[in-house]
Amino acid sequence: MTASLRAYLRLLENRSQLLRVRKEVDRRFELNAVVRKIQAGPNLPVLFEKVRDTRYPVVSNLFGNYGIIAELLGVEKNKVAARWTELTAAMNPIRDEHPAEADDWEEISPADIPKIVFSEKDAGPYLTASVIVARDPDSGVVNLSYHRMQIIGPDELRCRLSTSGDLYRIQQKMEKRGAPVPAVVAIGGLTDILYQQD
């Protein structure tokens, strides 16, 4: 079975595990305030249908409820990490073709991304749950890593690379070669593993 973020949301909704906010929310502070309230209460994934100044809906708290993740993986809560390791060990994270649900895939630029500002002290809008996919130029090993990325402009994202991370080492190798790091930013891509379990 193939999967997508939209398919995962349909699965959650069919299980009554997805909240919908139909009233328009402001992308600056208000959206995050609602998410925090939900996390303190039912702690369910939430879909904001209308977000001011963006044409896209926004989903948040997808993986914030450990009980839902355990249920979807078919294990007790204390077995989630072991099951996740088992499932991801056999996966190839780079696919040459889009899955059968091609309508659920869309390539967008930073200009299209809803620019959510989470708190007053943030320097600007950020992506908070996206994954950078990059390949080591020497070994060919693919690295996936979460990074909080600030949206700077229509074609620029910035993130801090930890010196202990594999992406930092890849970036250092490419910088010595005078070349950029070929990379993909995936949003919602890891729902694939969960959806396949239902």
Image (cartoon, rainbow, N blue to C red):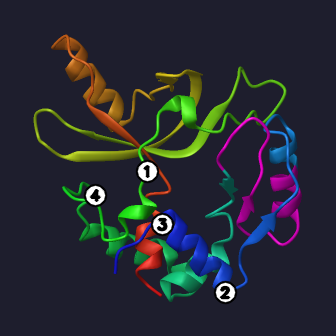
Q: What is the spatial separation of the Cα atoms under label 2 and label 3, in whole angstroms?
A: 16 Å
* In the image, residue 134 above or below residue 13: above
Please name the amino acid that badge 2 sits on: Arg
Determine the residue positioned at 36% across, 63% down.
Answer: 102
Circle nearer the viewer, 3 or 1: 1
Determine the residue positioned at 19% across, 10% down.
Answer: 178
The segment highlighted magenta reads 34-56
* In the image, residue 136 above or below residue 143: above
Please name the amino acid that badge 1 sits on: Glu
Label 4 element class = loop
Determine the residue positioned at 84% across, 40% down.
Answer: 26
Query: Percent from the top left, x then y, of residue 80?
Result: 51, 76
Could you say which disc has been placed on residue 106 in the image? 1
Reading the image, the residue beneath label 3 is: 191
Could you say which disc has been placed on residue 93 in the image? 4
Query: Percent from the top left, x then y, of residue 76?
Result: 57, 87
- Circle 3 crowding by C-alpha within 10 Å: few under 14, some 14–19, many from 20: some
Q: Which quadrant would the N terminus be assigned to in this image?
A: bottom left
Q: Sequence-wise, which precedes: disc 4 or disc 3?
A: 4
Q: Sequence-wise, which precedes: disc 1 or disc 4?
A: 4
Query: Percent from the top left, x then y, of residue 71?
Result: 58, 85
Reading the image, the residue beneath label 2 is: 15
Q: What is the spatial separation of the Cα atoms under label 2 and label 4, in whole angstroms?
A: 27 Å
